[in-house]
Amino acid sequence: MHLAQLNVARMLDTRDSERMASFMERLATVNAAADRAPGFVWRLQDDDGPGAIGQALNDDDLLLVNLSVWTDLESLRDFVYQELGHREALASRRQWFEKPLEPMTVCWYVTDGHRPTVDEADMMLARLREVGPSADVFPFTGRD
């Protein structure tokens, strides 16, 4: 089994705005670091630039989608908190993204080789929001 994760964030402005420029400039570098990170398996990508910035979730163009698969939760945590470029972006996130009022990340296990869709990931996030953490669906912080 591998760990799938969805992280969504609502941008404070459109992706091509001046406000979002410094975030967008970092995105390719941070994604490349993720691709090389121990435990990384796959991430959603599209043709609109680095990552999956063209993916709209629930027809909301301001929601930025990050969907990836890792060998385990520890590998994902190591990348999120130890990779310098990601850590710096995380520390600066309030200059680009709204403060969330509900869970914006969700993790769940998938069989090796499975590549989750945006719709599948959205259903997992909705499930976490509606019923809370379980053994099957849990926040990035871990299972309750």
Image (tube, grey):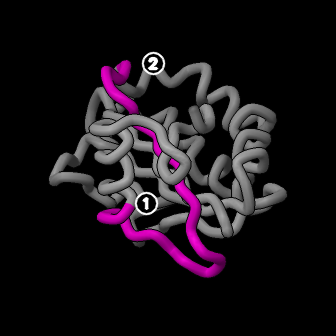
Q: Is residue 24 visible?
A: no
- Give the class, few, some or many, for how many residues have Cα within 10 Å of label 1's Cα (few <14, many ≥20): some
Q: Where is residue 5 drawn, in percent x and y?
A: 53, 52
Q: Tell which of 135 and 4 is nearer to you.
A: 135
**Apparent side of residue 119 relative to residue 73 in the rendered image (left or right):** left
Q: Amino acid at mark 2?
A: Arg
| Residue furthest bottom in the image | 113
Q: Residues within 10 Å of mark 2 (few under 14, many from 20)?
A: few
| Label 1 secondary element | loop
Q: Considering only vertical position in the picture, is 134 above or below 20?
A: below
Query: Residue 95, how many percent across, how many down?
Result: 44, 19
Quadrant in which the C terminus is drawn: top right
Give the vertical position of 135 relative to 19 (above or below): below
Q: Which region shows up in magenta?
A: 99-120
- Name which quarter of the figure residue 86 lies in: top right
Whether 106 is among the magenta residues is: yes
| N-term-proximal mark, 2 vs 1 | 1
In 3D space, how far apart are the residues under numbered discs 2 and 1 (Cα atoms)? 20 Å
Kind of element beneath mark 2? helix
* Residue 21 falls left or right of residue 82: left
Amino acid type, callout 1: Ala
Find residue 52 and name its label.
1
